Image (cartoon, grey):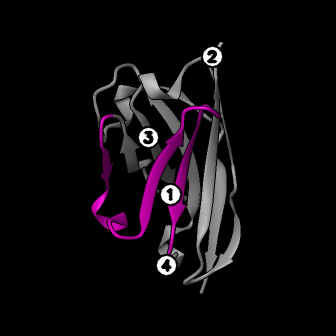
């Protein structure tokens, strides 16, 4: 049984940094493309960052986000800096069905429950 458990969200001020974690069980993060998505109220879920043989970012997060993984801990991280109120959303960790990088939510089979990030101005 695959489980992805996110943590690290919270309430921060504009300009602050935050690191989200995604602890995986039932799969090995180094063997799958892993991604972070977010969904704000009233908006569709959108891609934030992904990692497999390389890393890939949404244009809105380039230069402000870094995705990484710790194979020993079977955990994926999303480090974000310079947070803006527009970054407020529920952030989800996801594992794709293959090792191919994708920014499409439909290519990801497994999802965590999400962690709330709120950025105040």
Of badges 1 and 3, nearer the viewer stands 3
First of labels 4, 2 by sequence position: 2
**Residue 58, how many percent across, how many down?**
31, 57
Image check: 35 left or right of 110? left
Q: Is residue 4 magenta?
A: no
Image check: 33 left or right of 111? left
Q: Are marks 2 and 1 in contact (CB under 8 Å)?
A: no
First of labels 1, 3 by sequence position: 3
First of labels 1, 4 by sequence position: 1
Question: Which residue position is annotated with label 4?
Answer: 82
Q: Residues within 10 Å of mark 3 (few under 14, many from 20)?
A: many
Question: Which residue position is annotated with label 1?
Answer: 42
**Residue 6, how many percent across, how many down?**
66, 43
Element at badge 4? loop
Question: Which residue position is annotated with label 3?
Answer: 35
Query: Of residues 40 and 114, which is closer to you in this image?
Result: 114
Element at badge 1? loop
For the record, the magenta segment spans 53-82
């Amino acid at each position: 049984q695959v489980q992805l458990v996110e943590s690290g969200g919270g309430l921060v001020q504009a300009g602050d940094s935050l690191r989200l974690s995604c602890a995986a069980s039932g799969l090995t993060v180094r063997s799958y493309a892993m991604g972070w998505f977010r969904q704000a109220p009233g908006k569709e879920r959108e891609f934030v960052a992904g990692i497999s043989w390389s890393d890939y970012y949404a244009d809105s997060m380039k230069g402000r986000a870094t995705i990484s993984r710790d194979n020993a801990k079977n955990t994926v991280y999303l480090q974000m800096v310079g947070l803006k109120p527009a970054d407020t959303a529920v952030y989800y960790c996801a594992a794709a069905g293959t090792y191919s990088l994708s920014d499409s939510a439909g290519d990801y089979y497994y999802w965590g429950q999400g962690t709330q990030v709120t950025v105040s101005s």
